[in-house]
Structures are given as C-alpha cells and as structure tokens.
Image (spheres, helix red, strand yellow):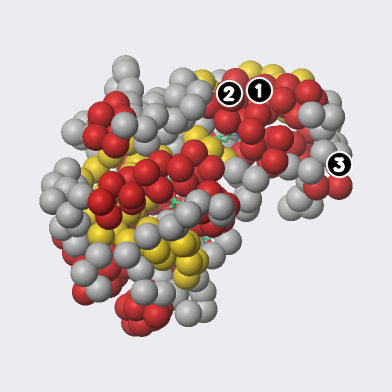
Amino acid sequence: MRLAVTGREGQVAASLVEAARGRDGVEVVTVGRPALDLARPDTVLAALEAARPDIVVSAAAYTAVDQAEDEKDLAFAVNATGAGKVAEAAARLGVSVIHLSTDYVFDGTKDGAYVETDPTAPLGVYGASKLAGEEAVAAANPRHLILRTAWVYSPFGKNFVKTMLRLASDRDEISVVADQWGNPTSALDIADAILRAGARLQADRNFAAFGVYHLAGEGETNWSGFARHILDASRAFGGPHAKVRDIATADYPTKARRPANSRLSSAKFAGVFGWQAPHWRASVEVVIGHLPIGMAWIPAE
Ligand SMILES: NC(=O)C1=CN([C@@H]2O[C@H](COP(=O)(O)OP(=O)(O)OC[C@H]3O[C@@H](n4cnc5c(N)ncnc54)[C@H](OP(=O)(O)O)[C@@H]3O)[C@@H](O)[C@H]2O)C=CC1
Ligand SMILES: Cc1cn([C@H]2C[C@H](O)[C@@H](COP(=O)(O)OP(=O)(O)O[C@H]3O[C@@H](C)C(=O)[C@@H](O)[C@H]3O)O2)c(=O)[nH]c1=O
C-alpha cells in the first residue's frame, strides 16, 4: 500500500512516515510545497499523480487558529478549495482520500461528547474553513473518509506540548485555561489509525462505509489538565517543569473563539475499523519519551 500524504513537515505527515518505517508493504510519500501548494490549485493533480498513490491522505492545512481570523481568504483557499482539489485529484486517479478535519467545526454547546451526526457550527474562521473543506471533499470524491480529530501533538512540528515545555523552561508558573474541554490526540496514534483504515480500504474493494468519523485520544481533559500532565511527564523524563495555574477563557483573550466543549466520541471509528486510540495520558508520555532529554531540544520559537 502506497500512501501519498499532503504536508511534508506537518505533524500527521511526519508521524505517518515514522509509523510506516519497518512495516512491510507500507510506503508513505509526502507531497508538499512547492510541488503541491494548496493555495495554487493547479499544482495539485500533477503533484499527486507523480506520487502514484493507492490512497491519498489529505493532512496539509492552514492550522493557525488565531491568524486565520485575519487571513480568511487564505484559510479558505487552503482548507476548503485546496482540500477539495486534493479529493478531486484522488478521484481522477481512481483512489480513496482520507481527509483530516477538526473538533473546531463544533460550537461547544453540547453537554456530552460530539457524534458525527451532531450539527456543526464553527466559532471561528479556521473551523469554518475546515467545515467547508469537509463539504468540498465529500462532493469531489465519494470514496472519502473524513477523520475529525482534536488537540493534536507529536514529537514533530509545533504543538501545545512543545509550547508548554518551552514556557516551562523559562518560568515557574504557567496560566492555562481550565474551562475548554476536549481530547488530546497524539499524531503517532492518528498515523496508526490511518494505516489501519487504509489497509481496510485496500483489502475490501466493496467497502461502503465512507463518510465522517471522529478519531481522538481516549479520555478527556481541559487545556490546564493537559498542561499539568505534560509537565509531570516532562519532569519524570528529566525535562523542564512548572506549576500550572487554572484560569478562565476570559483571562486569556485570543483573536479566535474556541469551543468550551469539543469532546469527540470515537465509537463509530472503533466499530467500523476495530481500532481505538490509547488513553491521552499514556500517549503524552510516549511523545515526551520520543523527545531528546534536556533543555537543548526545546524549540526556540
Ligand atoms: N494540529 C491540531 O491540533 C489539529 C489538526 N487537525 C487537522 O489535522 C490535519 C493535520 O494537522 P497537523 O499535522 O497538526 O498540521 P501542521 O500544522 O503540523 O502541518 C500543516 C501542514 O500543512 C502544510 N501546508 C500549509 N499550507 C499549505 C499549502 N498552501 N500548500 C501545501 N501545504 C500546506 C504545511 O506545510 P509547511 O511545512 O510547508 O508549512 C504543513 O506541512 C490538518 O488538516 C488539521 O486541520 C485537526 C485537529 C487538531
Ligand atoms: C499557550 C497557552 C494557551 N492557552 C490556551 C489558549 C487556548 O484556549 C488553548 C489552546 O491553545 P493553542 O492556541 O495552543 O491551541 P489551538 O491552536 O486552539 O489548538 C487547536 O488547533 C487546531 C489546529 C485544531 O484543529 C484544534 O483541535 C486545536 O488543537 O490554551 C493558555 O491558556 N495558556 C497558554 O500559555
């Protein structure tokens, strides 16, 4: 099985490369800028064709949640038009597309965990552009899996885990919002799940359960609880530590509004593909264990 993944240095793309290492019969090719630029739709088909995929994984996206409020056109060009072009190219090549989407398509007003049929109502430009991307993908290629995931972290790229470790390396206390709830998800686990789903699509030519799936780490927390566990795990591995202070969303003003509850139920994915993510706490420890110990590995920005 040969997967072409959009987004060369992205967390999910890099995690797929890592996950495929040492797995017989699995090849992962990353496709990114400048050859494939989602803001330049004319680049998409040729770049994916050259990768000769059995399945396309659409992981590249404009992911700067606050900046998107000021760059609406670019966010929609990449996350909606660009994503649609990727799915269309996969259809032209006669293959399925596995597209990544987000918990931020929801407004957070539900009491429990969101299921796939719950109404969407994004609070910000990023979520709205990703929702438009889901619609474009579904319209362009009937053979699609849209995987909505959440709060992604990994040893690669930029993410909340690395931000907390960086902040802890130069302060004693970090204030983090405790009233936004969700499911931290390791990109290494997402990669595992994608390989599982991809293998199923390859093996079962009559597979008919295309559509939207939620796919997130087991268990739930708020950003403050997430931060506290990151820093406890870091201390256990000899990395930086700081005290975490609970604050309210109102005390941490941001350009984009974020949902107060974006917990996702991943039961549908588990039922169809027989795969469930590990508990988020265990996966945080795995990711921190992947990072080199000591201050030197903390990214400067
Ligand atoms: N990060 C998160 O917390 C969450 C992410 N998701 C979704 O999961 C998917 C993967 O996210 P993640 O791996 O964290 O993303 P990252 O932010 O780590 O990486 C995004 C990738 O997209 C690429 N990209 C951005 N703009 C373009 C463009 N115009 N043309 C081509 N490539 C582009 C970037 O390329 P370059 O390296 O060149 O900058 C980068 O490789 C995305 O669809 C995202 O919306 C869903 C929920 C949570
Ligand atoms: C850095 C920091 C953030 N926060 C808050 C701000 C925000 O409400 C919350 C999360 O912060 P971030 O801005 O790092 O995370 P954010 O960019 O909102 O993360 C989102 O990214 C996109 C791509 C997704 O799809 C989502 O699932 C989600 O992972 O924590 C603090 O309270 N204290 C801090 O020191």
| Contact, mark 1 vs mark 2 (Cβ under 8 Å) | yes
| Residue 106 place in picture, x, y as percent | 32, 36
Please tell me whether mark 1 sits on a helix, a strand or a loop. helix
Q: Circle 2 — which element?
A: helix
Mark 1 vs mark 2: in front: 2
Please give the label number shown on residue 281.
Answer: 2
Residue at left 46%, top 20%?
219
The residue lying toward the viewer, choosing from 20 and 96, is 20
Residue 207: give x, y in percent of width and height: 17, 48
Q: Residue 277: x and y, percent?
A: 44, 30
Instruction: Indicate the amino acid at tag 3.
Output: Met
Q: Residue placed at 17% from the left, 43% from the top?
A: 209
Q: Of label 3 and label 1, which has the lower sequence position?
A: 1
Using the numbered discs, state the Cα–Cα distance from disc 3 to disc 1 in whole angstroms. Answer: 18 Å
Residue 229's disc is 1
Q: Can you give x and y, in whole percent of width and height, for residue 210 in the image?
A: 19, 47
Drawn side of residue 127 relative to residue 292, left or right: left
Q: Is residue 158 above or below residue 136?
A: above
Which amino acid type corresponds to the residue marked 1 in the rendered image? His
Disc on the earlier residue, 1 or 2: 1
| Residue 249 seen by the camera | no
For marks 2 and 3, the one nearer the N-term is: 2
Residue 299, numbered label: none
Q: Is residue 252 above or below residue 8?
A: above
- CA separation in Å, label 1 and label 2: 7 Å
Q: How many marks?
A: 3
- Position above or below: 80 against 228: below
Mark 2 vs mark 3, CA separation in Å: 22 Å
Residue behind mark 3: 295
Residue drawn at (64%, 33%) of the image: 286
